[in-house]
């Protein structure tokens, strides 16, 4: 069996609809087929539609343009469906393991045998960034455009909330790192929440528009700071204490569950079969990307999911809720199959993206080549300084950071890029050391996944700074994790994460980096930015 799946993957700067083709059991089907993969199984992605995403400032508020995203998703789904039909690789719609009884498993028996409808997509799933949400009224109508997590409405809110709910209590229940934009603080800043009857995280909101079904996928719910990480359900107590109306938080659903078929209007607009199942995937993009970490069984690995953010950490079976984990501000976000993503947000390539935007420069490869030649360790910043969070004049903020920390500002764009990348590598080194100490684990390899895995200079600096081998790739980790979870739900033989990761490893080219240079240089650099430890 093989399945054709659409992965809708929304990042903070762009959205994509990818067509995934998964045949985990392609083993042995090589004779006569040029496309077969020689026993490794097949896992292929084709980008069918890419579109811009980003903050839209309206008055003083940064929003997401959610309707534009929805429209682009429909365009992408239609294109993915047409491409599947043209390729004509699917014989019959497989029956999802947990499909609702209403979803027909195959074409109706009465369909004329001579003209079968070309088979389209077998399923689709949506993942996006975390923490943000839309509010619905009692009629299911959206109450205002979702606000962007980088908006200033949460300035000072965390401090206010922590006066009535202690940080210790919040950590004991949710295990979440303190970030000013966590959903709990956004809700505390929300105006008119009493008019809302349902809160839907971004992928759940889009899924609702496609299917009419409401629910809260667990990995994304786990980023709200309203989710009880041990009980794996909403914390009704925390919700009540911040004034969330009863019933606002919908029922939790797990990755792999079928959300529903398509609403008639959606099917009509996209040309998809209304029975096409919308499948809950690890709807937090980082959860989906961790699914696609190409680790081999038993490997002691860390990952850096590298994009706008760098999500740096470990995969664990149980949350670590100790005082040390809290003090180190590590998060215990929910992963697919009940795993824990024990990690910290490092500000990531966002700082460089904003520099390029402000300079009006889109030649990232050229900048990286120049940065590779720029002097090492000239200027260093703490990328997690709060001044780098909001959009704006990032080169200016780097200059301010330098003034505050007694350094000369970088004099060229190449020097700025070198400063950002070395500073990120230092932050990774520090974070991974803390993760090992706090979780009592050792790391033997660092997997860099996501768009940032293409940044050769950053990957090499990461290996050098961490003193560990780095394996870079896959680039489209979140879309791969998205389709793998769908494929399993539709019956592909991918019983667990180990099997999914083996398929990624067998079908994707990865790039190794060995640590080079002098470890003492990184020790000295680290104490310059973070003090001696
Ligand atoms: C990455 C990510 C991070 C989350 C941040 C804000 O795309 O999802 O995991 O902390 O965006 O939602």
Image: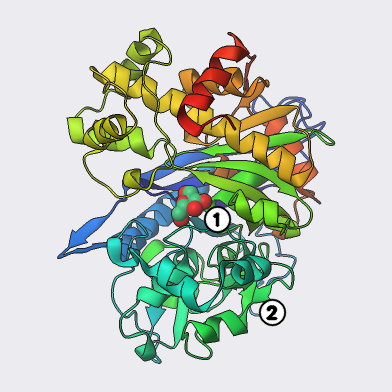
Q: In which quarter of the image is the C terminus?
A: top right
Tag 1 or tag 2, which sits nearer the N-term?
A: 2
Locate residue 89 relative to residue 53 in the image: left or right. right
* Quadrant housing residue 124: bottom right
Question: From the viewer's perspective, is residue 446 above or below residue 308?
Answer: above
- Residue 172 on image: x %, y %: 68, 68
Q: Does the residue labelled 2 lie within 8 Å of ligand 1?
A: no
Q: Could you tell me which residue is drawn at 27 percent across and 20 percent down?
A: 410
* Quadrant housing residue 185: bottom left
Please name the residue that numbered disc 2 is placed on: 101
Q: Could you tell me which residue is drawn at 47 percent across and 34 percent down?
A: 451
Observer able to see residue 27: yes
Question: From the viewer's perspective, is residue 74 above or below residue 10?
Answer: below
Question: From the viewer's perspective, is residue 218 above or below residue 24?
Answer: below
Please name the residue that numbered disc 1 is placed on: 121
Colouring of the image? rainbow
| Distance (Cα) linking label 2 and label 1 | 19 Å
Camera-nearest residue between 326 and 420: 326
Are circles 2 and 1 on residues that touch, CB within 8 Å?
no
- Residue 319 on image: x %, y %: 73, 58
Locate residue 1 relative to residue 305 in the image: left or right. right
Camera-nearest residue between 89 and 529: 529
* Quadrant housing residue 55: bottom left
- Residue 103 on image: x %, y %: 63, 74
Camera-nearest residue between 97 and 285: 285
SS at circle 1? loop
- Residue 157 on image: x %, y %: 38, 69
Camera-nearest residue between 46 and 94: 46
SS at circle 2? loop
């Amino acid at each position: 069996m093989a399945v054709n799946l659409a992965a809708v993957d929304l990042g903070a700067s762009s959205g994509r609809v990818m067509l995934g083709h998964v045949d985990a059991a392609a083993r042995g089907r090589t004779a006569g087929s040029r496309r077969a993969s020689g026993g490794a199984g097949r896992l292929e992605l084709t980008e069918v539609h890419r579109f811009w995403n980003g903050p839209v400032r309206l008055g003083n508020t940064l929003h997401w343009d959610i309707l534009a995203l929805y429209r682009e998703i429909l365009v992408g789904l239609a294109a993915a469906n047409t491409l599947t039909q043209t390729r004509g690789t699917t014989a019959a719609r497989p029956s999802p393991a947990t499909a609702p009884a209403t979803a027909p498993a195959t074409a109706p028996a009465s369909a004329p045998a001579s003209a079968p409808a070309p088979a389209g997509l077998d399923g689709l799933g949506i993942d996006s960034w975390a923490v943000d949400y839309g509010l619905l009224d009692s009629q299911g109508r959206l109450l205002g455009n979702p606000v962007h997590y980088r908006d200033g409405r949460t300035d000072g809110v965390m401090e206010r909330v922590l006066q009535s709910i202690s940080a210790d209590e919040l950590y004991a229940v949710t295990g979440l790192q303190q970030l000013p934009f966590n959903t709990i603080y956004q809700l505390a800043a929300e105006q008119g929440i009493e008019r809302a009857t349902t809160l839907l995280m971004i992928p759940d909101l889009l899924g609702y528009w496609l299917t009419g079904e409401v629910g809260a996928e667990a990995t994304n719910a786990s980023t709200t700071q309203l989710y009880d990480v041990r009980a794996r359900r909403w914390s009704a107590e925390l919700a009540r204490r911040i004034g969330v109306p009863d019933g606002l938080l919908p029922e939790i659903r797990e990755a792999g569950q079928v959300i529903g078929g398509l609403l008639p209007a959606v099917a009509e607009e996209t040309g998809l079969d209304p029975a096409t199942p919308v499948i809950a995937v690890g709807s937090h993009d980082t959860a989906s990307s961790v699914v696609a970490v190409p680790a081999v069984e038993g490997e002691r690995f860390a990952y850096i999911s590298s994009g706008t953010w760098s999500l740096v950490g470990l995969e664990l079976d149980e949350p670590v809720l100790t005082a040390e984990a809290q003090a180190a501000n590590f998060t215990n976000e929910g992963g697919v199959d009940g795993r824990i993503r024990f990690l910290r947000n490092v500000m990531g390539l966002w700082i460089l993206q904003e520099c390029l935007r402000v300079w009006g420069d889109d030649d990232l490869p050229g900048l990286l080549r120049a940065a590779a030649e720029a002097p090492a360790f000239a200027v260093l910043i703490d990328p997690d300084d709060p001044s780098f969070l909001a959009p704006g004049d990032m080169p200016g903020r780097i200059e301010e950071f330098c003034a505050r920390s007694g350094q000369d500002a970088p004099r060229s764009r190449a020097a700025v890029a070198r400063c950002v990348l070395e500073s990120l590598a230092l932050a990774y080194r520090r974070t991974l050391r803390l993760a090992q100490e706090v979780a009592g684990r050792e790391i033997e390899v660092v997997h860099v996944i996501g768009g940032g895995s293409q940044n050769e200079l950053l990957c090499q600096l990461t290996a050098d700074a961490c003193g560990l081998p780095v394996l870079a790739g896959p680039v489209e980790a979140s879309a791969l994790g998205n389709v793998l979870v769908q494929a399993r739900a539709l019956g592909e033989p991918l019983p667990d994460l180990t099997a999914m990761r083996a398929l990624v490893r067998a079908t994707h080219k990865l790039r190794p980096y060995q640590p080079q240079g002098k470890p003492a240089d990184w020790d000295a650099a680290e104490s310059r930015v973070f003090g001696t430890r």
